[in-house]
Image (cartoon, helix red, strand yellow):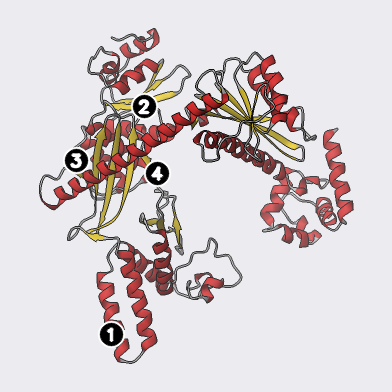
C-alpha cells in the first residue's frame, strides 16, 4: 500500500465486502470525493494500492486524504442513488463538476393550475414546468413572443388574486382567467397550442391555418386573414431555429472532446424529429479520467440534478462501465424505459459525430478564453508587483470595506482573491463592536484590522492588503496591522480618481483606467463592497423584521403572528374594530383595545410609546 495514515489503513482493512458509498475527507474533515462500489473493500483498497498508472487526479486526492467514511447499502442501485444525492449536495472537489454556459434564455410555461409564460435564464429541472430553448437571438425571441401572445393569449402575471383584469387583458395579450373571462378548456387549448409550436409539432396546425387564411381571404374577411397570417409568421419564426434531423424520435445526443486536463461536452436535444436546443459543458481537472468515467459522471450529475427527466434514448460516443445500472436508475426516475446507445451507422452515427465536432469546437473556444484569462490575470499581478514595488507576486490579496446606516448596524467585510480570482470560501463578515451608533469609518477599519491580523494568527498572511478608501483609511489601519506583527504591504484605493495610496508615500500611484492591474484592484474593491452591502442589508432586514406590533403593550410574538395570520394586510388590521381584533385567536379584549388605540394615536404620541417600550427593553 502507498503511504497513508494508520487510521485510514485500519479502516480499509476493516471494510465490509458489500455495496455502499465511500467518502474521502481532508485534514479539515471536508469531503473531497464521493464514490459508490459494489464491493466497498475491493474498491477502496484500489486507491491505496501502489499503482504506477494512477491518474494525477487520484494521486492528488489520496495525498490530501486524511480520513475515510462509508455508508453500507443493500444494493448497488441504492448506492448509486445515495452517491448522486451526496454529490449534488456537497459538490466534492475531486468529483466531476459540470460548468455550463447558461447565458441564453429559455421560454418557460409553468406547472400551475392556470399556467403562465415568461422568459427565464434559470432552468429549474424539478418544478414540473415546460422549458423551451435555449434561444441565441434574444431580440427575435421577444418579437416572436409578442406575435404568439396575440394569437395565444396566455397569462404572464405572478398572481391571480386581483379585483379586475389587468392591462394585458385589455391589450388582448391575456384571455383573463383571473376573472373567468375564458373557460378551462379554452385556456388548456391555448397552452397546448404553444407547447406544440415550441416542440415542433405544428406542421398540421400551420397547414390548417393556411387553409383558414385562404378561406377568409376568399370570403373577403381580410382582417381575419391578416390575423391568421400573423399567427403563421409567429409559428414559423419560432421554428426557424429548429432543424429537421430525423423523421421521428425523442433522444439526447452527447458529444465528448478531450484535451489534456480539460474536457468539453455538447448535448443535442432531439424532440419529435427536430433539434430543439443544445447545451455546452466544460470539465476542468479531468486528466487521467477515462472517457467512460467522464460520461458516467456526466449522466449522474446532469440527469440526476434536480430531477432532470431523461428522454427515451441517450446516444453516447462510448458506453460507461456501469451502463446497465444507469439505465435501470434512469428508467425508474423517468417512469419509463431509458436506453443508452452508441450508434455505429446511419443517421444517428452522423448525429453523434456532429455532437463530437461541436464539443471539440466548444472546447477549443473555451481553451482560448482560459488562456486569455490566465494571461490577463498573471499579467495584472506582475504589473501590480512592479508599479507598487511589492516584494513578491500578490497571489493572495485581501480587501476590506465598511458599511453602516448613519452609524447604525456598522459592518465590515473581507474578501480574498487567490491568483486574481475570488476565493469565496475565505470571505469574512464583521459586526463592529466599537463604533455602533457613531459613524467612524477610520475607527471601524482599525477594529477590523485588529480582529483579522491581531486575533487570527493561524490564517495565511496575504501578499497584499487592499483597503477601500484613501489616505485616511490607510493611516488608520497601518499602525494596527504592524502592531499585530503582519508585514504584508498595504494600499488604499480611493474611488473618486482611483488613486492608489501606498505606505510611506503621500503621493498616490495613478494607473490608466484600461490597465488590467487597476481593473483587478477595482474588481476586488467592488467585490468587498458588494459583500459588505449584502451583509448590511441582511442585518438591517432582520432588525426591520421586528414588527411595529412588538411596541404595543400586551402584544408578544404569539399574538403578533396571530394578528398577521388573521388580517391580509397592515391596512386591514388598522381598520379593524375592537371586536374584530378580540376575536383573533390568542387575543383578549384588553389586548385588542391596546392595538386599536395604538393605531389611532398621533404620530408623536405613537413615537413616545415606541421609545418607552425600547427603554423598558434596555432595562
Q: Earlier in the sequence, mark 3 or mark 1?
A: 1
User: Can residue 447 be seen in the rendering of this structure?
Assistant: no
Q: Earlier in the sequence, mark 2 or mark 3?
A: 2
Mark 1–mark 2 distance (CA, rounded to whole Å): 63 Å
Q: Judge left or right: residue 168 versus residue 556.
A: left
Dots 4, 2 in contact, CB < 8 A: no
Instruction: Find disc 2 in the rendering and name its residue.
Output: 94
The part of the image, by quadrant, that contains residue 281 is top left
For label 2, count other residues whose C-alpha is less than 10 Å away and answer few (under 14), some (14-19) or many (20+): some
Instruction: Find disc 1 in the rendering and name its residue.
Output: 214
For label 1, count other residues whose C-alpha is less than 10 Å away and answer few (under 14), some (14-19) or many (20+): some
Extreme-left residue of the structure: 345
Residue 329's x, y, as percent? 28, 40
Q: Earlier in the sequence, mark 1 or mark 2?
A: 2
Mark 4–mark 3 distance (CA, rounded to whole Å): 25 Å
Q: Earlier in the sequence, mark 4 or mark 3?
A: 4
Instruction: Find disc 3 in the rendering and name its residue.
Output: 317
For label 3, count other residues whose C-alpha is less than 10 Å away and answer few (under 14), some (14-19) or many (20+): many
User: Can residue 29 be seen in the rendering of this structure?
Assistant: yes
**Residue at image point 37% right, 71% down:** 189
SS state under label 1: helix
Amino acid at each position: 500500500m502507498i503511504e497513508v495514515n494508520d487510521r485510514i489503513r485500519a479502516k480499509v482493512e476493516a471494510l465490509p465486502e458489500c455495496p455502499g458509498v465511500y467518502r474521502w475527507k481532508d485534514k479539515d474533515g471536508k469531503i473531497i470525493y464521493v464514490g459508490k462500489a459494489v464491493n466497498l473493500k475491493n474498491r477502496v483498497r484500489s486507491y491505496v494500492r501502489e499503482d504506477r498508472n494512477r491518474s494525477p487526479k487520484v494521486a492528488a486526492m489520496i495525498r490530501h486524504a486524511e480520513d475515510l467514511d462509508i455508508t453500507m447499502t443493500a444494493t448497488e442501485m441504492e448506492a448509486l442513488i445515495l452517491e448522486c444525492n451526496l454529490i449534488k449536495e456537497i459538490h466534492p472537489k475531486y468529483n466531476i463538476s459540470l460548468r455550463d454556459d447558461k447565458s441564453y434564455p429559455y421560454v418557460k410555461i409553468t406547472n400551475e393550475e392556470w399556467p403562465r409564460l415568461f422568459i427565464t435564464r434559470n432552468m429549474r429541472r424539478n418544478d414540473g414546468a415546460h422549458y423551451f430553448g435555449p434561444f441565441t437571438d434574444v431580440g427575435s425571441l421577444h418579437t416572436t413572443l409578442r406575435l404568439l401572445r396575440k394569437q395565444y393569449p396566455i397569462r404572464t402575471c405572478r398572481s391571480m388574486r386581483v379585483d379586475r383584469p389587468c392591462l394585458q387583458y385589455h391589450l388582448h395579450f391575456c384571455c383573463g382567467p383571473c376573472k373567468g373571462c375564458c373557460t378551462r378548456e379554452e385556456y388548456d387549448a391555448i397552452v397546448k397550442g404553444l407547447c406544440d409550436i415550441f416542440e415542433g409539432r405544428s406542421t398540421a396546425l400551420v397547414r390548417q391555418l393556411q387553409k383558414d387564411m385562404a378561406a377568409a381571404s376568399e370570403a373577403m374577411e381580410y382582417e381575419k386573414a391578416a390575423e391568421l397570417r400573423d399567427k403563421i409568421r409567429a409559428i414559423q419564426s419560432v421554428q426557424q431555429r429548429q432543424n429537421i434531423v430525423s423523421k421521428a424520435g425523442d433522444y439526447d445526443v452527447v458529444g465528448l472532446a478531450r484535451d489534456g486536463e480539460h474536457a468539453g461536452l455538447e448535448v443535442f436535444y432531439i424532440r419529435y424529429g427536430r433539434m430543439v436546443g443544445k447545451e455546452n459543458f466544460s470539465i476542468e481537472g479531468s486528466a487521467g479520467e477515462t472517457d467512460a468515467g467522464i460520461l458516467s459522471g456526466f449522466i449522474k450529475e446532469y440527469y440526476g440534478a434536480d430531477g432532470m427527466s431523461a428522454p427515451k434514448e441517450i446516444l453516447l460516443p462510448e458506453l460507461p462501465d456501469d451502463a446497465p445500472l444507469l439505465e435501470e436508475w434512469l428508467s425508474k426516475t423517468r417512469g419509463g424505459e431509458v436506453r443508452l446507445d452508441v450508434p455505429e451507422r446511419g443517421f444517428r452515427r452522423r448525429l453523434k459525430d456532429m455532437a463530437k465536432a461541436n464539443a471539440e469546437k466548444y472546447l477549443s473556444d473555451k481553451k482560448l478564453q482560459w488562456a486569455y484569462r490566465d494571461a490577463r490575470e498573471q499579467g495584472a499581478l506582475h504589473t501590480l508587483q512592479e508599479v507598487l514595488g511589492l516584494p513578491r507576486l500578490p497571489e493572495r490579496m485581501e480587501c476590506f470595506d465598511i458599511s453602516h446606516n448613519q452609524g447604525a448596524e456598522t459592518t465590515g467585510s473581507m474578501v480574498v482573491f487567490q491568483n486574481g480570482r475570488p476565493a469565496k470560501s475565505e470571505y469574512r463578515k464583521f459586526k463592529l463592536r466599537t463604533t455602533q451608533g457613531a459613524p467612524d469609518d477610520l475607527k471601524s477599519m482599525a477594529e477590523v484590522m485588529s480582529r483579522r491580523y491581531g486575533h487570527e494568527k493561524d490564517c495565511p498572511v496575504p501578499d497584499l492588503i487592499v483597503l477601500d478608501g484613501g489616505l485616511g483609511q490607510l493611516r488608520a489601519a497601518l499602525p494596527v496591522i504592524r502592531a499585530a506583527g503582519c508585514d504584508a504591504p498595504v494600499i488604499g484605493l480611493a474611488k473618486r480618481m482611483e488613486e492608489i495610496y501606498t505606505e510611506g508615500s503621500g503621493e498616490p500611484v495613478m494607473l490608466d483606467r484600461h490597465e488590467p492591474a487597476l481593473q483587478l484592484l477595482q474588481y476586488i474593491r467592488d467585490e468587498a463592497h458588494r459583500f459588505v452591502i449584502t451583509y448590511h442589508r441582511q442585518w438591517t432586514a432582520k432588525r426591520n423584521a421586528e414588527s411595529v406590533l412588538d411596541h404595543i403593550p400586551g402584544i408578544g410574538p404569539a399574538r403578533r403572528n396571530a394578528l398577521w395570520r388573521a388580517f391580509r394586510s397592515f391596512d386591514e388590521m388598522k381598520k379593524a374594530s375592537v371586536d374584530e381584533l378580540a376575536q383573533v385567536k390568542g387575543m383578549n379584549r384588553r389586548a385588542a383595545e391596546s392595538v386599536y388605540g395604538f393605531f389611532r394615536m398621533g404620530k408623536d404620541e405613537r413615537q413616545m410609546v415606541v421609545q418607552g417600550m425600547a427603554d423598558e427593553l434596555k432595562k
